[in-house]
Every structure is written in structure tokens, then in C-alpha cells.
Image: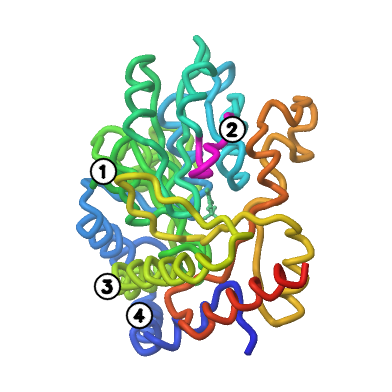
């Protein structure tokens, strides 16, 4: 029995006719770019999520970039983000001409440590990108209060936190806007690249839509120079077909995480993910912390269990930020944890027997080592 890290085919097979119909209908109607499937998905996602505007775009990197551009962020500005994330959370800041400023992660919850935020704010700071990593939200109300106090924008990167909650408020609804990715492996995934922005701000929504479509809300009337960042009709139709299942899939992830948690109680070598009080973690990733990680990773691989590391190098220590000369002590938690974190297989279709096998192998490894 091999256990993949994610199994997108298992999900496809579980809703095959719905997906196949969605794709063939879109082709029959030649609704390849924009049009009904895209409008339908935007409307359905807005309704289910409880937000006024959904602006679809090509991916969850563009959504961050579009937001910052339309919030007026550019050269000479600073935007604060977190040291452990996917590169999109910082490269988009640089793309606007602004400078990314990193803060370390919280030792228990692995996302932005809000206690470190205020120290990094200065007169150049224009925004904070709070990344709700792994499916668990940051301490977003504290972050929002700090942003309000300093009159800076709060953008939420929700690429890993569809339908996650903190104090009953969903990811993306506290700041000025939320940015989503529908990359295939995300909790709600297309069959190619896709993303969106959500916001309750009418003006920002209109401007983002305009910027993503060459600066024109009406064809040939280009009010500004924009970019081409559109959602394909086929991707939108696939997302609409998947949407009725997302809440069940989310519950399955939570159930799987609770089974892992329970089984790991008898494995003291494993530090399981800690739940922030008042938080609904949707487990895009199930990340444990261990010693001898590379040996464990190799042992699991040899026994047919595929794991991953999110992320092997914290952003400030990547080659592309070498010029900034960051030192380990600048981001001590991210630096230490980069050698300890391990993402175990998790996806809604993962079976209890498979979870039991993963945990049994880890137990066996630490028994021998
Ligand atoms: C996946 C991801 C993105 C980017 O999404 P794409 O759709 O791949 O461009 C941005 N931020 C985070 C935290 C992500 O995990």
C-alpha cells in the first residue's frame, strides 16, 4: 500500500460525472474565457463564503499582486509578511516595486507572530499580508487592530485557508480583502491555475476587476493599463462543480487530523499541530515537528509514504533575498523549525487504515532510532 501526499485522482473519481459534464458543457458553449461559467462561479463562491464581491483571476499569486497595485502600493513602500510561506507572499510585494519585510513565525501556530508586528512598522509601511498558513488563521483581530492603529492595509493570503475561521469569522473577511488560490492541490482546487480576490469594498472590487482585465471594465475602454489575469471558463465550471462538496471535504480533513492527533498521543517524538483557541483549522496541511527529520522522511519514502516539507527554506534565506544578508537570529523560530517540520499525507479521501499505517511507521522509526 503506497500512500501519496495528495490524491487528486481519488477526488476526481468520486465526482467524475459532475466534472465531466461541467467540462463538456463549457466546451459545447465555447465559454472559454469569462462568460457564464466564470460569473456563475463568482456568484456561487460569494454566496457560500458570505462576501459581497468575488473577483476571479488567473491564480493566487496574481490576486495578491492585483490587490497591492489597486491599493496604491509601489516603489518606496514596505509591506510586511511572514518568514515561512510560499514565495508568492513576498515576490508579489517586490513586483509592485515595494520592499518585503519579514517577521518570524509563532512558535506554536507556525504563522505570523503578531507580537513581532508593531516593531516592524514605520512610516514606509503600507500594508501587512497575513498568511493563514496550513489552514489555520493568524491572530487576525490583533493584527487588524495594529493595522488600524497605524492606518495601514491588511491583506489576507487565504491560499491555504478556504473556510478556515477565527472567532467565527472566515479567512479573508477581516482585512480589506482576501486572496485565494485554486491551484489543484489547494483545499478547493481547479484542474489548472485559478485564483480570486474577495472583498466587501465596492471600489476596490471594481478596480481589481478592471486591473485584471487590461484596465477595461467595458471592452476597448481602457481607463488604466492593467494586466491579463483571467479565469478560464473550464476552470470556473470545474470549481462550481466542486463547490457543493467543499464543506464536506473540509470536515473530512478535520476528521483526519483528529485521527492523526489521537494516534500520535502514543508517539512522544512527534509534536502535533496545535490549535489556536477559537480557531477552525481546515488542515490544508498536517504538519508535525520531529527530530531526525531527513532520516524519517527517507524511511517513510522507502515504505511507500510520500511526505513533503512546507517549506524547506524560509523566505528570507532563499537565494533571491541573499543580498539582504539575513541571519539565523533574525528569524530564529523559522530557522530552527525548517529542519523539524514535516507535512504528512492529508486529503479528504485518505482512509483511516492509511492514517494508521503512517503513524505505525513513524512509531516504528522512533522505536528503532
Ligand atoms: C499556493 C499559494 C499561493 C499562490 O497561489 P498560486 O495559485 O499557485 O499562484 C500564494 N500564497 C500561498 C500561501 C500559497 O500557498
Quarter of the image for the N terminus: give it. bottom right
The earlier-in-sequence mark between 3 and 4 is 4
| Element on which disc 1 rests | loop
The CA span between labels 3 and 4 is: 13 Å
Q: Marks 3/1: CA distance? A: 24 Å
Residue drawn at the location 43% of the way across and 36% of the way down: 67
Instruction: Give the extent of the magenta segment.
Output: 103-112
What residue would you read off at disc 2?
104
Q: Are marks 2 and 1 in contact (CB under 8 Å)?
A: no
What residue did someone put label 4 on? 22
Residue 135 point in image, percent of width and height? 44, 54
Estimate the spatial distance between the alpha carbons at disc 2 and disc 1, rounded to whole Å.
23 Å
Look at the numbered discs 2 and 4 and tell me whether their residues touch, using CB distance below 8 Å.
no
Of badges 3 and 1, nearer the viewer stands: 1
Q: Which mark is residue 167?
A: 1
Image quarter for residue 42?
bottom left
> Which is more toward the observer, 126 or 361?
361
Task: Identify the secondary structure beneath mark 4.
Answer: helix
Q: Position of residue 154 (x, y in %)?
A: 39, 30
| Mark before the other along the chain sequence, 2 or 4 | 4
> Magenta residues: mostly which secondary structure?
loop
Please tell me how crowded label 1 is: few (under 14), some (14-19), or many (20+) other residues with Cα within 10 Å: few
Report if the beta carbon of the residue with label 2 is closer than 8 angstroms to ligand 1.
Answer: no
The answer to which of marks 1 and 4 sits earlier in the sequence is 4
In this view, the residue in front, 302 or 60, is 302
Amino acid at each position: 500500500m503506497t500512500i501519496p501526499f495528495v490524491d487528486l485522482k481519488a477526488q476526481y473519481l468520486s465526482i467524475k460525472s459532475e466534472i465531466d459534464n461541467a467540462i463538456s458543457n463549457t466546451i459545447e458553449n465555447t465559454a472559454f474565457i469569462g462568460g457564464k461559467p466564470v460569473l456563475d462561479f463568482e456568484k456561487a463562491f460569494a454566496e457560500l463564503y458570505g462576501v459581497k464581491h468575488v473577483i476571479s483571476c488567473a491564480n493566487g499569486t496574481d490576486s495578491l499582486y492585483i490587490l497591492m497595485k489597486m491599493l496604491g502600493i509601489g516603489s518606496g513602500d514596505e509591506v510586511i509578511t511572514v518568514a515561512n510561506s510560499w514565495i508568492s507572499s513576498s515576490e508579489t510585494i517586490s513586483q509592485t516595486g515595494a520592499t518585503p519585510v519579514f517577521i518570524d513565525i509563532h512558535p506554536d501556530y507556525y504563522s505570523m507572530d503578531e507580537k513581532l508586528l508593531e516593531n516592524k512598522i514605520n512610516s514606509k509601511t503600507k500594508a501587512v499580508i497575513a498568511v493563514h498558513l496550513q489552514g489555520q488563521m493568524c491572530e487576525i483581530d490583533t493584527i487588524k487592530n495594529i493595522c488600524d492603529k497605524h492606518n495601514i492595509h491588511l491583506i489576507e493570503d487565504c491560499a491555504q485557508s478556504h473556510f478556515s475561521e477565527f472567532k467565527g469569522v472566515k479567512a479573508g473577511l477581516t482585512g480589506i480583502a482576501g486572496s485565494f488560490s485554486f491551484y489543484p492541490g489547494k483545499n478547493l482546487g481547479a484542474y489548472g491555475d485559478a485564483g480570486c480576490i474577495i472583498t466587501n469594498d465596492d471600489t476596490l472590487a471594481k478596480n481589481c476587476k478592471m486591473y485584471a482585465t487590461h484596465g477595461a471594465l467595458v471592452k476597448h475602454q481602457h481607463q488604466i493599463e492593467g494586466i491579463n489575469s483571467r479565469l478560464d471558463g473550464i476552470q470556473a465550471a470545474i470549481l462550481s462543480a466542486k463547490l457543493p462538496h467543499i464543506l464536506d471535504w473540509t470536515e473530512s480533513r478535520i476528521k483526519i487530523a483528529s485521527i492523526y492527533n489521537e494516534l500520535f498521543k502514543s508517539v512522544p517524538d512527534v509534536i502535533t499541530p496545535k490549535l489556536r483557541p477559537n480557531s477552525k483549522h481546515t488542515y490544508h496541511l498536517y504538519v508535525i515537528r520531529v527530530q531526525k527529520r531527513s532520516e524519517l522522511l527517507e524511511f517513510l519514502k522507502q515504505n511507500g509514504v510520500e511526505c513533503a516539507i512546507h517549506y524547506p527554506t524560509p523566505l528570507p534565506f532563499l537565494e533571491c533575498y541573499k543580498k539582504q544578508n539575513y541571519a539565523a537570529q533574525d528569524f530564529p523560530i523559522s530557522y530552527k523549525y525548517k529542519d523539524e517540520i514535516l507535512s504528512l499525507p492529508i486529503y479528504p479521501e485518505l482512509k483511516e487504515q492509511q492514517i494508521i499505517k503512517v503513524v505505525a511507521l513513524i512509531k516504528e522509526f522512533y522505536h528503532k532510532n
